Image (spheres, rainbow, N blue to C red):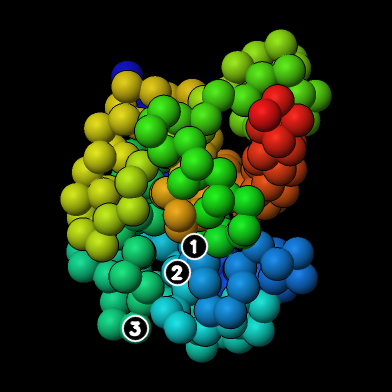
Amino acid sequence: MRVNPVPATPLSDAVREIVEVGRFLSVRNFVPATSGNFSRRLDARTAAVTRSGVDKGELVEADVLVADLHAPPPEGASAETPLHLQLYRDRPDAHAVLHTHSVVSALLSNLRLAEGELVLQGFELLKALGDTRTHEAAVSIPIFPNDQDIPRLASKVTALLEQRPELVAYLIAGHGLYTWGRSMAEARRHVVALEHLLTYELEKMKVLR
């Protein structure tokens, strides 16, 4: 079967998209302090990734590094960069990966960790996720325990993605959200939609107590 080549994205375009999404998500308090990390695929071999320890709402060109998908992350990159690179290797159609640290994603992932996943259903906003076309769908968001051994965590994510090609996101308990898209615009839409959906779910839990 013929595999379509991954179209190349100029580094300057990737930097612009990362800087813009950083400002967009920062004003919504999805990446407080220096939390979170973003990336944008450049081609089949490389991706642009954010540098560690910087405020994502104040990113500049020097805060974006180039990483080889099949090599150790570049010096200065976030310790979580392997999670981004693994997603690009596992999902050839993923062109942007966004990791956020909102209050609701950290709290709800802790509260629902024992279940291993959060199943969202009955919400109209589900249609903003990937190829979901109806509010009647059930969308699963896996929840992984937090782990400082990032390669070990990445291997767990890979194992699950192999079984669940429909997934568009996952949560790390007490930590935050990872989501991706076929473009930066789609990945950003996933973040906004999921943050609202997680908030709906948390409010529903309060009502049903």
Secondary structure under badge 1? Answer: strand
Q: Is residue 148 left or right of residue 27?
A: left
Secondary structure under badge 2? Answer: strand
**Marks 2 and 1, Cα distance to the nearest angstrom?**
4 Å
Q: Disc 1, disc 3: CB below 8 Å?
A: no
Sequence order check: which comes first, mark 1 or mark 3?
1
Q: Is residue 157 left or right of residue 129?
A: left
Q: Is residue 138 above or below residue 85?
A: above
Q: Local crowd at mark 1 within 10 Å, few (<14), some, or many (≥20)?
A: many
Tell me the number on the disc at residue 49: 2
User: Is residue 193 visible in the rendered structure shown here?
Assistant: no
- Asked whether 10 or 139 is in front, the reply is 139
Q: Is residue 125 above or below residue 97?
A: above
The quarter of the picture where the C terminus appears is: top right
Residue appearing at x 67%, y 78% in the figure: 57
- Asked whether 63 or 195 is in front, the reply is 195
**Marks 1 and 3, Cα distance to the nearest angstrom?**
14 Å
How far from the left and from the top, in percent, is residue 122? 73, 18
- Asked whether 111 or 197 is in front, the reply is 111
Q: Is residue 40 left or right of residue 84?
A: right
Q: Local crowd at mark 2 within 10 Å, few (<14), some, or many (≥20)?
A: many
Residue farthest toward the front in the current orientation of the protein: 209
Residue on which disc 1 sits: 39
Residue appearing at x 65%, y 84% in the figure: 58
Q: Disc 2, disc 1: CB below 8 Å?
A: yes
Sequence order check: which comes first, mark 2 or mark 1?
1
Q: Amino acid at mark 2?
A: Val
Residue appearing at x 29%, y 77% in the figure: 74
Q: Amino acid at mark 3?
A: Gly
The quarter of the picture where the N terminus appears is: top left
Residue on which disc 3 sits: 76
Where, by quadrant of the figure, is residue 134 drawn?
Answer: top right
